[in-house]
Image (spheres, rainbow, N blue to C red):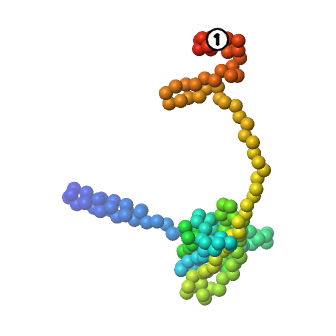
Amino acid sequence: MRLRILLLVLVCGSFFTAVSQEQPIEDNTVEGAPRASVDKGLFGRVVDSKSGKGLDAASVQVFAHTRDTTGKQRDSLIAGMLTKPNGDFNFVNLTLPDSFSVKVTALGFAENSKLVAMDRADVAKLGMDVGNIKLANQADLLGSVTVVAQRSALQMGIDRKIFNVDKNITSAGGTAVDVMKN
């Protein structure tokens, strides 16, 4: 009898442990906006406007355009990711409103934002291709900089300590023995 109870507890414990490992499904919806599910993905490529080569690690963000209760238009972030080394990005299993924007930023490049309107019939079959998004170089030339610094009084080496006595008041007018004592 005890063996059966122990076996029942063991089976129930294993079952509940296995069930608790399921991952919850995220709801990527925005309140108050008509939605379309993009199962095949929202995809595109970020390229340099001069060379046409893909940009690695550019930030791609998808914003939904909705109106709040006061009637003001608000942008809500739906998803974001970094591009692959060839500049490709792909968002899967998104629920998107009828109009949204794709904002792309990268270090050393000007920000680019693309407004997208959806055709629900094509999106359901193929996914949504936003095409190549071109980013222009943004070079900001800074003025020249002169670094002025003083040596620190104490420098720690691997095998020794170096004490600079140049600015030490107690070493003025004394000998090396006086500096070593202080």
Could you tell me how many numbered marks the image carries?
1
Residue beneath label 1, please?
175
Viewed as shown, does residue 114 lie left or right of 157? right
Quarter residue 8 falls in: bottom left
Secondary structure of residue under mark 1: loop
> Where residue 120 sits in the image (x, y, percent)?
62, 85
Of 83 and 1, nearer the camera is 83
**In front of the other: 27 or 17:** 27
Front-most of residues 172 and 97:
172
In-image side of 151 versus 26 (left or right):
right
The residue drawn where x is 25% and y is 60% is 7
Residue 125 appears in the picture as rendered: yes
User: Going 75% across and 42% down the picture, which residue do you hit?
Assistant: 146
Residue 82 rendering spot, x and y as whole percentages: 58, 65
Residue at horizontal 70%, vertical 15%? Answer: 172
Q: Is residue 117 above or below residue 8?
A: below
Residue 128 in picture, x, y percent from top left: 60, 81
Residue at 65% x, 72% y: name it.
51
Left or right of residue 46, residue 67 in this image: right
- In which image quadrant can residue 13 be found? bottom left
* Corner quadrant of residue 85: bottom right
Confirm whether residue 102 shows in the render. no
Residue 66, horizontal then vertical, whole percent? 72, 73
Q: Crowding near pointer 1: few (<14 within 10 Å), some, many (20+)?
A: few
Q: Quadrant of the C terminus?
A: top right
Say if 168 sits above or below 37 in the image: above
The amino acid at mark 1 is Thr
